[in-house]
Amino acid sequence: NAGVTQTPKFQVLKTGQSMTLQCAQDMNHEYMSWYRQDPGMGLRLIHYSVGAGITDQGEVPNGYNVSRSTTEDFPLRLLSAAPSQTSVYFCASSQPPGEAFFGQGTRLTVV
Amino acid sequence: AQSVAQPEDQVNVAEGNPLTVKCTYSVSGNPYLFWYVQYPNRGLQFLLKYITGDNLVKGSYGFEAEFNKSQTSFHLKKPSALVSDSALYFCAVRAVTGGGNKLTFGTGTQLKVEL
């Protein structure tokens, strides 16, 4: 099993550019989520989805969009990148109440 | 709103000594509780979870955690630390009911095990 696959692993963007971070899981999990990790702040929830066609905002949703057209995929879109979005992004999937499985992360730098 | 507190940014312990990484939580109703470990430049790896049942939960790599409902705590422990245990540890909580199944993390505790 591949588990949770995130692409790309690294990305450098210029301010104002847009991009999509890809996330796919092969465990048929209903719940998927995106987090950002910043030093001293732990993991903060950006957006989450409880199933195909259903998404909701987390703790820090501004500047990000998501969609969930299939059970497997949960892409995260940055519409107009800002330096404050420089971070490490993690996608996770789970079947509540079980544990979440995490991707390897995307290290994003916005210059 | 649910939350997790990890009061220590860093814990230092000598190899062979017992270690404790502290976690307290706040959630409406009963909690599901988790511990994860993160090695440098890696994703998060699951260590153990409390869903129901025994308050003492055993997990991977010799780690265990004790659920204390009255103190709303879920401290991570290991009887004898190894240098290879040095990593960043995260506690997380999910509400049994309500909360939209959201998984909320603490800010993390850096564990440093020295010879």
Image (cartoon, rainbow, N blue to C red):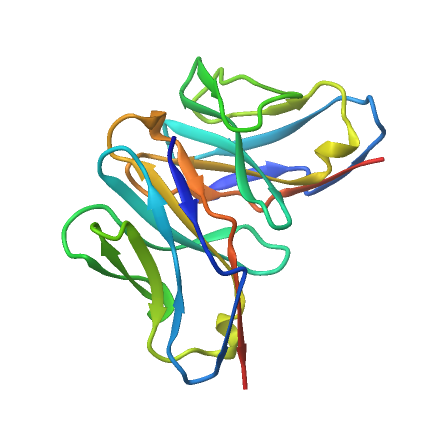
Q: Residue at 20% of width from left, 51% of height from top?
A: B70
* Residue reaching furthest to the top: A53
Q: Residue at 43% of width from left, 49% of height from top?
A: B5
Q: How far from the left and from the top, in percent, is residue B78?
A: 35, 72
Near-viewer residue (B9 or A87): B9
Q: Quadrant of residue A108?
A: top right
Of the 4 image quadrants, the one containing the C terminus of chain B is: bottom right
Q: Residue at 74% of width from left, 33% of height from top?
A: A84
* Residue reaching furthest to the left: B53
- Relative height, residue A92 to residue B91 (above, below): above
Q: Quadrant of residue B67?
A: bottom left
Residue A9 horizontal side relative to residue A49, left or right? right
Q: How far from the left and from the top, in percent, is residue A95?
A: 33, 34
- Circle count: 0
Residue A1 horizontal side relative to residue A5, left or right? left
Q: How far from the left and from the top, in percent, is residue A32?
A: 45, 30
Q: Residue at 77% of width from left, 27% of height from top?
A: A82
Q: How far from the left and from the top, in percent, is residue A46?
A: 55, 29
- Relative height, residue B72 to residue B101 (above, below): below
Of the 4 image quadrants, the one containing the N terminus of chain B is: top left
